Image (spheres, rainbow, N blue to C red):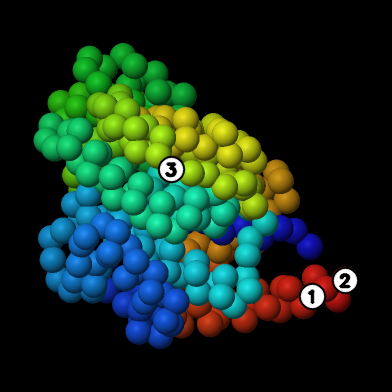
Amino acid sequence: MGKLAFIFPGQGAQYIGMGKDFYKEFLICRQTIEKAAEISKLDLEKICFEENEKISITEYTQIAMTAVEAAILKALEEKGFYSDMTAGLSLGEYGALLASGAMSLEDIFYTVRKRGIYMQEAVPKGGAMAAVLGMEAELIEMLCEETQGIVSVANYNCPGQIVITGEEAAVAKASEKLKEAGAKRILPLQVSGPFHCEMLTGAGEKLSKVLEEIPLREIKIPYVSNVTAQMVTEKEEIKKLLVKQVSSPVRWQQCVETMIENGADTFVEIGPGRTLSGFMRKINRNVTVMNIQTVEDFWKVTEKLEERRENSVGK
């Protein structure tokens, strides 16, 4: 039997009502979200569960998403389910860090709150992101390099889907070039900043100061870094990678491939939406993918994980 991986989605998967059933159903989930609210000094019940505009503004999205992902993870751990390895897309890497045991819950929430604020402040206006469908990464990279202004790859999501990021005018110009060169579609993304590009370097530098204060623990469960797409097993590597991650491309496809190379055959996506599950089908159809975003999902997945565990013991 192969290994189990927990994976965590990033910004863009959030929606009103995310985590509400977990908040009502499990004490550990309620306590986790309340802890995030206490540390961030935000009304996360209102942001997560009621109609509002803040849920899609980075400085609020990040802590709200992380609180929900942490709550679901804590419910899994309370039932005795742990992974063999873990990873998260962009913001989701903090969910993976929590699963790895490298940072405490309180420090995760404190760091993510600061990260969201710094990323929002770095480029409040003047940036854009767009998904490029149906084109090879090498050609996208080349055309971005040839475009005047700041534009580069933000996310290597899966075969046939790469996200570009940068200055609004440069992203628009690169998008024209990519269409002319044969991209199937270019989809402008509704985001509040041009994430994972050099325009966010200042946010990374501010985050570095925060991370200096954060004590790290030994890594119990290896996680895969967005920056290198390599397993991180030494806590000394973590802080510099988190700083780089803010302005570096997210190599998600490569992260998944690394986990599969290291024996992962079952993936559980923890958090709002099914984005990562969709990517997984394009990266490798031979692995099992499950998703937990509702309590109903939770019981279905834990039943399968229990069967998996019993089969493993039986062998």
Label 3 vs label 1, nearer the camera: 3
308 left or right of 126 in image: right
Label 2 vs label 3, nearer the camera: 3
Residue nearer the viewer, 233 or 209: 209
Using the image, determine if residue 127 lies above or below residue 37: above
User: Residue at 32% of width from left, 77% of height from top?
Assistant: 20
Could one spot residue 148 in this view of the protein? yes
Pointer 3 residue: 214
Q: CA distance from mark 2 to mark 3?
A: 42 Å
Which image quarter: residue 170?
A: top left
- Contact flag, marks 1 and 2 (Cβ < 8 Å): yes
Residue 298 location in percent, x, y?
50, 77
Considering the numbered disc 3 on the image, is that residue within a helix, a strand or a loop?
loop
Could one spot residue 281 in this view of the protein? no
- Contact flag, marks 2 and 3 (Cβ < 8 Å): no
Query: Dot 2: few (<14), some (14–19), or many (≥20) neighbours within 10 Å?
Result: few
Residue type (three-letter) at the residue carrying disc 1: Asn
Query: Dot 3: few (<14), some (14–19), or many (≥20) neighbours within 10 Å?
Result: some
Residue type (three-letter) at the residue carrying disc 3: Ile
Pointer 2 residue: 315
Q: Earlier in the sequence, mark 3 or mark 1?
A: 3
Residue 207 location in percent, x, y?
33, 36
Pointer 1 residue: 311
Considering the numbered disc 1 on the image, is that residue within a helix, a strand or a loop?
helix
